């Protein structure tokens, strides 16, 4: 567990958390595996591109993150719904079941800023798709690491208050409609952490994360389980990583199930393949994106 991070109380249950790049548990080996090189034997040229992207991330990411603690609870007669801050969300049965007896929820958001995303786009525009793909993979991995560190901080803060937390869940997971992203952000201050939403619910900057963590004295933390998720056509179903089956929503980056389908990076068609990259390369953005080509 990492050190306790500084946070600033903005009032009305809103806190901003100071997360530096050095606070992230970012594993190079996990990114290499996500690029398709499960044995770690990445070609020297691509290893150099990866190291360059990691250095760019360390220098150029502007991380902002925070959360708001709101009242939460089941909705009578609606096993597929949960109330958050007075708004009823159709989060579907799987997520509602995982939240269990939560009587509060931490509504969170975080971003790494637009810098690395723009760097990846420029590489694409300059005719270097491999560099662009790898930079996008690193950006996604950093965004995921921000979510991990923010969740860990929320857990530490709630433990201090005598509460427990669940795992985190986001619109787009296990049937929870991305359209409800707008209602979720309505519970946060306008442009919280510098994040805005497109009409479809896509966050800008693109390498941003959002969602909820259930909080309460009787909640339980549970890992994401493929056998309870209804998404069956994502890339990694049944694919072995480290001896275990990696299931729906595997981003190809942090080796985690997220319950959403992987997408091609920055504006590339699903059929586009970077030359000589590994067989299972995926640089999925965290949220389903109707503004880009779908696989």
Image: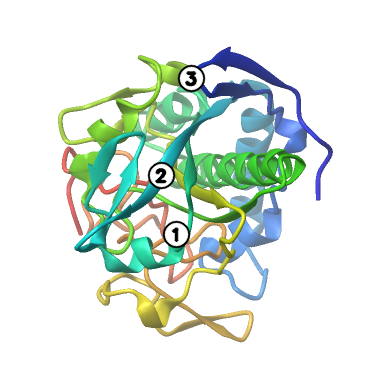
Neighbour tally class for label 1: few under 14, some 14-19, many 20 plus, Cα within 10 Å: many
Q: How is the image coloured?
A: rainbow
Report if the CB atoms under discs 2 and 1 are less than 8 Å apart.
yes
Name the N-terminal-most of marks 3 and 2. Answer: 2
Identify the mark at residue 72; answer none if there is no mark.
Answer: 2
**Of residues 281 and 158, which is closer to you in this image?**
158
Name the N-terminal-most of marks 3 and 1. Answer: 1
Task: Estimate the x, y position of residue 146 in percent, counting from the top left.
Answer: 60, 39
- Name the quarter where the C terminus is drawn: bottom left
| Circle 3 or circle 1, nearest the eye | 1
Q: Quarter-wise, where is residue 122 in the image?
A: top left
Measure how far apart labels 3 and 2 are at the Cα level. Answer: 23 Å
Determine whether, in the image, residue 93 is placed left or right of residue 290.
Answer: right
Residue at image position (56%, 27%) is 65
Relative to 125, does residue 232 appear above or below in the rendering? below
Residue at image position (51%, 28%) is 116
Report if the CB atoms under discs 3 and 2 are less than 8 Å apart.
no
Identify the mark at residue 193; answer none if there is no mark.
Answer: 3
Q: Secondary structure at mark 2?
A: strand
Task: Report whether residue 228 is seen.
Answer: yes
Task: Report whether residue 281 is seen.
Answer: no
Task: Estimate the x, y position of residue 21 in percent, counting from the top left.
Answer: 70, 31
Q: Secondary structure at mark 3?
A: helix
Relative to 100, does residue 15 appear above or below in the rendering? above
Residue under numbered circle 1: 99
Measure how far apart labels 2 and 1 are at the Cα level. Answer: 10 Å
Task: Estimate the x, y position of residue 44 in percent, counting from the top left.
Answer: 67, 56
**Of residues 160 and 237, which is closer to you in this image?**
160
């Amino acid at each position: 567990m990492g050190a306790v991070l500084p946070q600033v109380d903005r009032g009305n249950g809103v806190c901003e958390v100071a997360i530096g790049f050095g606070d992230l548990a970012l594993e190079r080996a996990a990114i290499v595996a996500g690029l398709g090189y499960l044995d770690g034997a990445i070609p020297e040229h691509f290893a150099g591109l990866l190291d360059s992207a990691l250095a760019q991330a360390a220098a150029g990411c502007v991380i902002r993150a925070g959360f708001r603690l709101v009242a939460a609870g089941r909705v009578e007669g609606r096993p597929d719904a949960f109330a958050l801050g007075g708004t009823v969300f159709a989060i579907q049965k799987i997520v509602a079941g995982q939240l269990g007896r939560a009587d509060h929820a931490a509504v969170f958001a975080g971003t790494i800023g637009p810098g690395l995303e723009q760097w990846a786009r420029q590489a694409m525009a300059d005719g270097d798709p491999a560099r662009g793909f790898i930079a996008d993979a690193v950006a996604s991995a950093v965004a995921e690491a921000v979510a991990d560190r923010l969740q860990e901080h929320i857990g530490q803060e709630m433990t201090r208050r005598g509460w427990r937390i669940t795992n985190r869940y986001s619109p787009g997971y296990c049937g929870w409609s991305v359209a409800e992203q707008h209602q979720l952000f309505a519970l946060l201050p306008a442009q919280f952490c510098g994040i805005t939403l497109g009409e479809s619910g896509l966050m800008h900057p693109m390498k941003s994360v959002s969602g909820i963590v259930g909080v309460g004295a009787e909640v339980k933390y549970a890992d994401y389980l493929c056998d309870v998720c209804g998404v069956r056509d994502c890339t990694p179903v049944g694919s072995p990583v480290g001896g275990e089956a990696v299931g729906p929503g595997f981003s190809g980056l942090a080796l985690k199930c997220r319950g959403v389908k992987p997408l091609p990076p920055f504006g590339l068609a699903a059929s586009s393949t970077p030359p000589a990259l590994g067989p299972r390369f995926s640089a999925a953005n965290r949220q389903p994106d109707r503004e880009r080509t779908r696989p």
